Image (cartoon, rainbow, N blue to C red):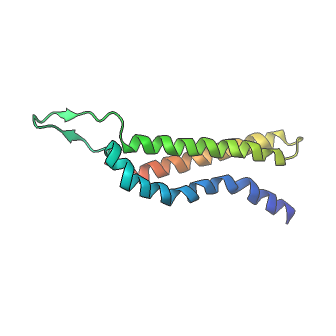
Amino acid sequence: MKNLKKIVVLLTPVLLFAVLLIPYSLVNQRIIVDWLGCGCPVIDEAGNLVENNFNANDFTALFWMFVSVCVTVISAFLSRRIPKEKVWFKVVYIAGMLLISLLITYQFCQMMAWN
């Protein structure tokens, strides 16, 4: 039971994604898209494609990458709970949390993309 509790505590940083998903989605729909524009192609009166350098899709990617870095840093601090003689497990844990957070970030960016 003690090991199960330790495992649950080590996996809690991933919950940051679940906690931020709905609030960020609402802010993205109501504020960020109006402010930065969507990733949709814009055509001017002459029929030329106007380049939109930084839009809501880029902001979303930056936001979720920042969350991914935060999850990895929190995981690095939580890895102190792992015994010192299991250094290999600490490395695998931190690398695994980074990989999981990057996969979640990719999925969220694809899900929230404005085309």
30 to 45, vertically: above or below: below
Q: Is residue 114 visible?
A: no
Horizontal placement of 12 versus 2: left or right?
Answer: left
Q: What is the tally of numbered marks visible in this picture?
A: 0
How far across and how far down the image is residue 91, in percent?
A: 75, 39
State the residue in front, 70 or 5.
70
How far across and how far down the image is residue 18, in percent?
A: 57, 59
Where, quadrant-wise, is the N terminus in this rendering? bottom right
How far across and how far down the image is residue 23, in percent?
A: 49, 58
Q: Residue furthest bottom?
A: 1
Dividing the picture into quadrants, the one containing residue 53 is: top left
Q: Is residue 65 visible?
A: yes
5 to 92, vertically: above or below: below
Residue at 66% x, 47% y: name it: 97
Residue at 61% x, 44% y: name it: 99
Horizontal placement of 51 versus 85: left or right?
Answer: left
Residue at 71% x, 46% y: name it: 75
Residue at 78% x, 42% y: name it: 90
Dividing the picture into quadrants, the one containing residue 7 is: bottom right
Horizontal placement of 54 versus 102: left or right?
Answer: left
How far across and how far down the image is residue 80, in percent?
A: 82, 44
113 to 95, vertically: above or below: below
Q: Residue furthest right?
A: 85
State the residue in front, 56 or 84.
56
90 to 8, vertically: above or below: above
